[in-house]
Amino acid sequence: MATDMKTYYHTTSHGTRIFVEECGTGSELMVLMHGLGGTTNAFQPLVAPFSSKYTMLRFDFPGSGFSTFSKQSPPSIPQFVDDLTSILKERGGHDNPILVGHSLGSIVAMHYASQHPEVKALVLIGPGRSASHIPAAVERMTGLGNAALNGITDIRDSTIANNVAPTSSDLVRTIVRQMISSQDAEGYAATCFAACAKSHTDPDYAAIKCPAVLIAGDQDKISPLSRSEELKELIGGDGEKASVSVEIVQSGHQQVLEDTAGVVRAMEKLLSSL
């Protein structure tokens, strides 16, 4: 396991300070992006399996974890994509990143891949899609954001219940509770509002040409298997498509924490084919 962990802050053009962690000794770059209410810790179980083969870069989205956000320039999905672009540009090198995204992070990964054909592969875990055109979904996310403004503890237990499968361990619930509890209420709410804003549209799925694996939890209430199957048909369009597969793991919406071995197997299957 890699012990060369380094942390730093990346300052964006709009004044946000993004907390970044890097570890690993591999020549290839793997970028890991968490979901709503997550932090870099959501991917800690993947460090041991992959840090000897890849340089692993994790960061907290603006408004999450240790990253700040600007009230004058509220978070948005396009801004998150720009932030990823900025982080990678500042690092230099690594022209062909492997992008790993969970939920919200998968949305950012797909947007980036649709704009950057150099992306080598996508790992999309409990993938998300735009719901800004669905009034009930907008109402639900807006309500969650407003509830968070009253205090993270008001939404913590319901979030754990919706994210973690009943069959999963109490350790997983403890980790998710810690991540949710660490969130800044205003930052969490701003991310909820960004997810349902009109600026959140689906990417050009047909423009994504790299290999991809969609990892679905068999008990996931938030991103059911049907969504991964739907995205499998959309990614790459109707032309000559790259390899896109769906893998099912035993989990709710915290796949990496709930079924680490299953996620690792799904990732290794894709990465070994590159």
Image: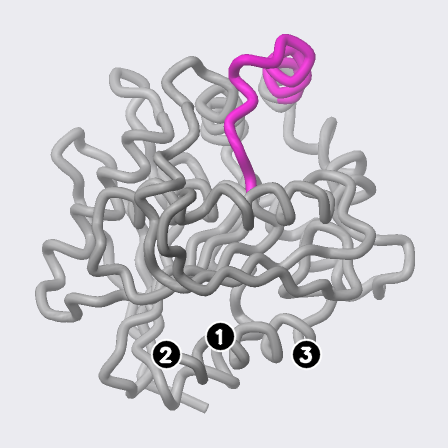
Decide: is 103 above or below 171. above
Three-letter amino acid code of the residue under disc 2? Leu
Is residue 59 shown left or right of residue 249?
Answer: left
Task: Determine whether the residue tagged by mark 1 lies in a helix, strand or loop.
Answer: helix
* Label 1 vs label 3, nearer the camera: 1
Q: Position of residue 263 (x, y in %)?
A: 62, 71
Binning the other alpha carbons within 10 Å of mark 1 as few (below 14), some (14 to 19) or many (20 upward) gives some
Of callouts 1 and 3, the N-terminal one: 3
Q: Is residue 269 above or below residue 52?
A: above
Q: Which residues are magenta?
A: 128-144
Residue at far front of view: 239
Q: Are marks 1 and 2 in contact (CB under 8 Å)?
A: yes
Tag of residue 274: 2
Q: Which residue is mark 1?
A: 270
Query: Disc 3 designates what residue?
Result: 261
Element on which disc 3 rests: helix
Badge 2: few (under 14), some or many (20 or more) residues near its Cα, within 10 Å? few
Badge 3 density bin: few <14, some 14–19, many ≥20, Cα 10 Å = some
